[in-house]
Image: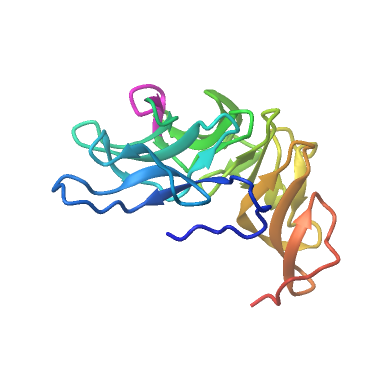
């Protein structure tokens, strides 16, 4: 896919990571996850489908040290989703179904290398995890984390979308309600997008629709003055 070099200062080198379709004359070559320079003159493969993966999940992330985080479905007979990291030299399988986990959502990595992800356990519970430790699960008062796509900052603080039996849908930062609520449908919000972002200062950004109509991009629990689109 073409590189977006907008807003890159002249002479600066911008590193992006993408799932690329690599076409060669080799029959076994299928696709590769790659780190690509802004000039498109250098490409460093991280992992491809000749390895243990049958397909990659679409979203990838990269830390400041160049570590790339990605997830996908493993080849048979192992099968199932897994999360790995790589740096162009080696690839490390971080989490798979051989332990307590049964399935994984799309993971996130911070500039510091902190990792967060949604996963379901063999026990039937679903949680949000930082590293291997759960910071929230669906045992209550948060009841549904299946649609969560968490974001994580350099300090390991996490923001995520979830459903709560007491507050409805919301954007949360941890398991303790109401202390960890960024925004929920008990206030002016009617619904939320699944994608969230959290910066290193702990400020959370999200997309939401409003009870009063319309939707927009918001920071924390404060309605932005700029409403970006009309609600359908």
Magenta stretch bounds: 91-102
Q: Nearer the viewer, residue 105 or 165?
A: 105
Q: Position of residue 221 (x, y in %)?
A: 82, 51
- The coloring applied to the image is rainbow
Q: Is residue 151 above or below residue 209?
A: above
**Image point 85% across, 55% down: which residue?**
222
Question: Would residue 150 be counted in the magenta stretch?
Answer: no
Compared to residue 42, the image places residue 154 above or below, namely above
Which quadrant is the C terminus positioned in? bottom right
Answer left or right for 29 relative to 145: left
Q: Residue at the location (67% across, 29% down)? A: 156
Name the residue at 77% across, 57% down.
218
Indicate the position of residue 99 as horizontal and vertical percent values.
Answer: 38, 21
Q: Nearer the viewer, residue 61 or 103?
A: 61
Q: Is residue 168 left or right of residue 108?
A: right
* Number of numbered discs on residues: 0
- Residue 93 in the magenta stretch? The answer is yes
Residue at 16%, 47% in the rendered image? 26
Where is residue 58 drawn, in percent x and y?
43, 50
Q: Quadrant of residue 4 in the image?
A: bottom right
Residue 25 in the image: x percent, y percent?
Answer: 16, 51
């Amino acid at each position: 896919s073409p590189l977006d070099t907008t807003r890159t200062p002249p002479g600066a080198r911008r590193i992006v990571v993408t799932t690329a379709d690599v076409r060669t004359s080799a029959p076994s070559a299928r696709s590769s996850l790659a780190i690509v320079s802004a000039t498109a003159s250098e490409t460093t493969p991280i992992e491809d489908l000749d390895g243990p993966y049958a397909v990659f999940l679409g979203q990838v992330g990269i830390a400041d040290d160049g570590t790339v985080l990605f997830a996908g479905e493993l080849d048979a007979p192992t099968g199932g989703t897994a999360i790995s990291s790589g740096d162009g030299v080696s690839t490390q399988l971080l989490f798979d179904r051989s332990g307590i986990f049964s399935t994984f959502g799309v993971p996130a990595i911070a500039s510091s290398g902190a990792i967060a992800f949604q996963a379901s356990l063999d026990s039937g519970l679903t949680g949000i995890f930082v590293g291997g430790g759960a910071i929230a699960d669906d045992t209550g008062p948060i009841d549904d984390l299946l649609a969560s796509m968490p974001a994580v900052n350099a300090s390991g603080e996490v923001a995520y979308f979830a459903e709560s039996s007491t507050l409805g849908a919301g954007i949360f930062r941890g398991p303790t309600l109401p202390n960890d609520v960024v925004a929920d449908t008990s206030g002016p919000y009617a619904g939320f997008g699944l994608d969230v972002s959290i910066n290193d200062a702990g400020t959370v950004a999200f997309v939401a629709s409003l009870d009063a109509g319309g939707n927009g991009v918001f920071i924390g629990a404060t309605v932005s003055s700029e409403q970006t689109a009309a609600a359908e």
